[in-house]
Image (spheres, grey):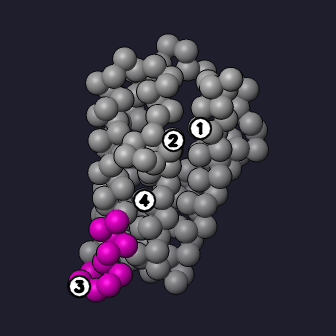
Amino acid sequence: MMGHFGFSYIGLLFLLLLFIPNIIWTRKKPQEYTSQNENRIFLIFERTGEVLTTICMLIFDDFNLHTWSYWTWWLVAAFGLMVMYELWWVRYFRSAQRLSDFYSSFLGVPLAGATLPVISFFLLGIYGKVIWLVIATIILGIGHIGIHAQHSKELKD
């Protein structure tokens, strides 16, 4: 449950699926978007979670493919959620790119842009049986989903 050190190509793939649309987004932000007034506690959790999650995804080879077992279904589920995340981004980039589009749900998942990758990483931690990624993802989720929930609430008010 602690993890075996070594490079994870699956971890790298998941990080690329996360980072590439976010890099594109920096040029396609909603006009009204601002990061001002974000809860400092959520921000600390988010930044800490981002660093810890990124490190864990790359330094534990437990996420790489193994022989098929019941544990592999956790990887399938994690990958399925990342595919949903990519589809959410496609929908966002094809939209008018308003704040309401950015904080939208997708296939019943609320705040999909924040929720889908966090749950995906959490499931990847279960698949790899790496408690450090599970913990890092919980920290990330508190901050990242918390910030998105705060912005979404402000948008509705």
Which residue is drawn at the image coordinates 30% and 68% (left, top)? 76
Q: Which residue is mark 2?
A: 111
Indicate which label's residue lies in the foreground, 1 or 2: 2
Q: What's the residue at 50%, 49% (across, down)?
A: 115
| Nearer mark to the viewer, of 2 and 4 | 2
In the drawing, what numbered circle is on residue 67?
3
Q: Quick check: marks 3 and 1 in contact, CB under 8 Å? A: no
Instruction: Find the distance from the CA under tag 1 to the CA under tag 2.
Output: 7 Å
The answer to whether one can see residue 7 in this image is no
Name the mark nearer the viewer: 3 or 2: 2
Residue 79 visible: yes
Residue 11: image location, x then y, percent:
37, 62
User: Could you tell which of marks 3 and 2 lies nearer the N-terminus?
Assistant: 3
Which label sits on residue 109? none
Question: Which of the marked residues, 1 or 2, is nearer the chain's N terminus?
Answer: 2
Q: Residue 89 sits in which quadrant?
A: top left
Name the kind of residue labelled 2 in the image. Leu
Q: Which mark is residue 120?
A: 4
The residue segment tinted magenta is 66-77
Distance between the alpha carbons at the discs numbered 2 and 4: 14 Å
- Dot 1 and dot 2 residues touching (CB under 8 Å): yes
Query: Within 10 Å of the Cα at label 4, are there few (<14), some (14-19), or many (20+) other Cα atoms?
Result: many
Residue 16 part of the magenta-drawn span? no
Distance in Å between CA atoms under marks 3 and 1: 37 Å
Give the residue at the far left of this rendering. Answer: 67
Asked if 38 appears above or below 45 in the picture, the reply is above
Q: Position of residue 148 (x, y in %)?
A: 59, 38
The amino acid beneath tag 1 is His
Of the image marks 3 and 1, the number of the one nearer the N terminus: 3
| Label 3 CA crowd tier, 10 Å (few <14, some 14–19, many 20+) | few
Q: Are marks 1 and 4 in contact (CB under 8 Å)?
A: no
The question of residue 72 being in magenta is answered with: yes
